[in-house]
Amino acid sequence: MSEEREDKTAAKLTPAAFFDVDGTLSSTNVIRTYLDFWLQEVPLHVRLFRLMRFLPKVPYYALLDTLSRAQFGRAFYQNYARVEHSRLALWAESAVERYWQPRLFPRALERLHYHREAGHRVILVSGGVEPTLRPLARFLEVDALVAAEPEAKDGHLTGRLLHGPMSAERKAEATRRVGANLNVDLEQSYAYSDSYSDVAFLESIGNPVAVNPDRRLRNLARARGWPIERWRLY
């Protein structure tokens, strides 16, 4: 009888497709997303001033990202300190059509549609901050969004992340957790990412796919026989 019950439970499991966002679903990255938010609806002279202040930090962030995606996340999201949560939410709503849609890879949208038509769950798993991605997830009609959660106090972000950056093993853990909540069969599921920093995430799923991979992920994918795909805007 218990075996019968286990078989019924197993039968309820369904495959899912887990998509990273930046560089995988779209040609975006967290720096561009932040700049789009920070430079919107301000006079030209303010925009130029902010840009000139920010650009010298880019090499530092690039180096930090190469050394550790988690360290990069902790350092970079400090830029959101003192940002009004409501203002960020308004930007995110307007950004779907203006910022995100022109940057979504057509083949990524085709793959999303394929998985949805196959009856698979579709889940976004991103190192970006959740408020910036929530309207995009709604637009894409995904089953779940897993992203970094910014700390907020008195209606403003503090620049800290509640549970740390969504990267490396934590991203894999979050994937397993949302999979369990949605009764997902991880062995039969698919994971898409462009970054070597997502190896733990890719390894946690039965069918990893390297999309627009960086050099280290490309080499690893070749060594392990993972599919490698190139998704472009045109």
Image (cartoon, grey):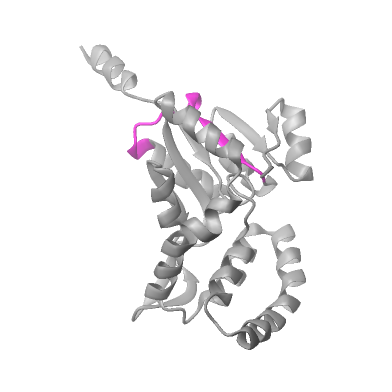
Check residue 14 for magenta coloring.
Answer: no
Is 97 placed above or below 182 here? below
Q: Quadrant of the N terminus?
A: top left
**Measuring 79% from the left and 36% from the top, which residue is drawn there?**
219
Q: Is residue 166 visible?
A: no
Q: Residue 179 appears at what percent x and percent y? A: 40, 37
Left or right, 144 with reference to 114: left
Q: Residue 231 appears at what percent x and percent y? A: 67, 39
**Quadrant of the image occupied by residue 206:** top right
Is 84 placed above or below 111 here? below
Check residue 181 for magenta coloring.
Answer: yes
Number of marks in the rendered image = 0
**Quadrant of the image occupied by residue 192:** top right
Q: Is residue 134 visible?
A: yes
Q: Residue 224 appears at what percent x and percent y? A: 72, 28
**Measuring 52% from the left and 60% from the top, which residue is drawn there?**
98
Residue toward you, 234 or 36: 234
Is 44 placed above or below 6 here? below
Left or right, 36 with reference to 53: left
**Which region is colored magenta?**
180-194
Left or right, 3 with reference to 98: left
Left or right, 70 with reference to 172: right
**Measuring 76% from the left and 38% from the top, which residue is drawn there?**
218
